[in-house]
Image (cartoon, rainbow, N blue to C red):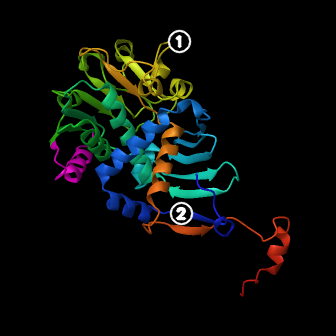
Amino acid sequence: MTTLSPSDKALVPFVSVDNMMRLIHHIGVEPMLVGLADYIEQDFRRWELFDKTPRVASHSAEGVIELMPTSDGEVYGFKYVNGHPRNTRDGLQTVTAFGLLADVSTGYPVLLSEMTMLTALRTAATSGLVAKYLAPKGADTMAMIGNGAQSEFQSLAMKALCGISAVRLYDTDRAASEKAARNLAGSGLAITICDTPEESIEGAQIITTCTADKQYATILTDNMVGSGVHINAIGGDCPGKTELAPAILHRSEIFVEYPPQTRIEGEIQQLGADHPVTELWRVMSGQAPGRRSPGQITLFDSVGFAIEDFSALRYVRDRIHGTGYHFDLDLLADPDDPRDLFGMLMRATPATR
């Protein structure tokens, strides 16, 4: 992290939703997914440097509001994020978010950014990155079960990072699948809309589940999952919210981001606390194997972790310089004399009514 000069310290770069979209178009969706995956992989390989804690969550009947903090000792980051599945009924987003990076040596923020769009990208980038390590060789087809806001990002990430060429869509709301198919037209992916989840997994080597309801659900039953597939389970991400039949978990080699959080929020909340799982950072750093055999079922029990958001914010921080896709916020009081905050107030020109 470059130390800011005194004249710049009070101004904090802010990336709005509009500027985030401009930045994504400037870079390109697929190149940005690849870039984010690279930053995430870099940080997973230095996992032991980071402060780690399960996210701080405030749950309600309607959803959850969370803070996700971490630091590598030089830079501190956090994300504020909500998850409210019923929001879509009122025309609102299920997930919204913003995030911040700060210089540990001064405590001064160095980036404030929207993270609704960025979280969608980093979630998909993480899925694609993990599938590079766990999906069967030659995987070319993904079943995408649940065709809400994540479906297009997930599909493009698997294309950009794993080389898939076909996506089979299923959602209980066919309009959602039709939306996803329209959005992915021209992407280079062969898109099929399916009438049942069973139909969607026909010929798929990667199965992604991404449904929204906050309930113990069974999106995949045991008899639906054959040998050799990789399951990318991203919808079960809070207590009381799952997507997979427990029998699938017992047949799978399970990979997780941070066990203390995943055991609370992920599919493995259905299992005993001593059920073995493999941490992904150990796979990426070469300390543990990923897929070991063609017939193995691998399961990424994805709940999202603060280090991934930290990586995404680092990526944005490094990409906005010279682009104009941000503006500076006068967010911090910065008097000439740090001991004279009141004097700064008194010298300010009063607003005219």
List the residue tagged with mark 2.
14
Q: Which residues are magenta?
A: 172-190
Residue at the image position 81 percent from the left and 65 percent from the top: 338
Determine which of the numbered discs, if any, sits on residue 132 in the image: none
Relative to 1, is 302 on the left or the right? left
Quarter holding the C terminus is bottom right
Front residue (pair 49, 191) = 49
Residue at the image position 52 percent from the left and 41 percent from the top: 63
Front residue (pair 4, 272) = 4
Q: Residue 119: where, in percent of width, then height?
A: 44, 47
Front residue (pair 8, 213) = 8
Neighbourhood count class around disc 2 (C-alpha, 10 Å): few under 14, some 14–19, many 20 upward: many
List the residue tagged with mark 1.
274
Rounded to the nearest whole Å, what is the CA distance between mark 1 and mark 2?
Answer: 43 Å
Q: Residue 144: where, in percent of width, then height?
A: 26, 36
Q: Amino acid at mark 2?
A: Phe
| Disc number lying in front (1 or 2) | 2
Residue at the image position 46 percent from the left and 47 percent from the top: 312
The answer to whether one can see residue 23 in this image is yes
Front residue (pair 324, 62) = 324
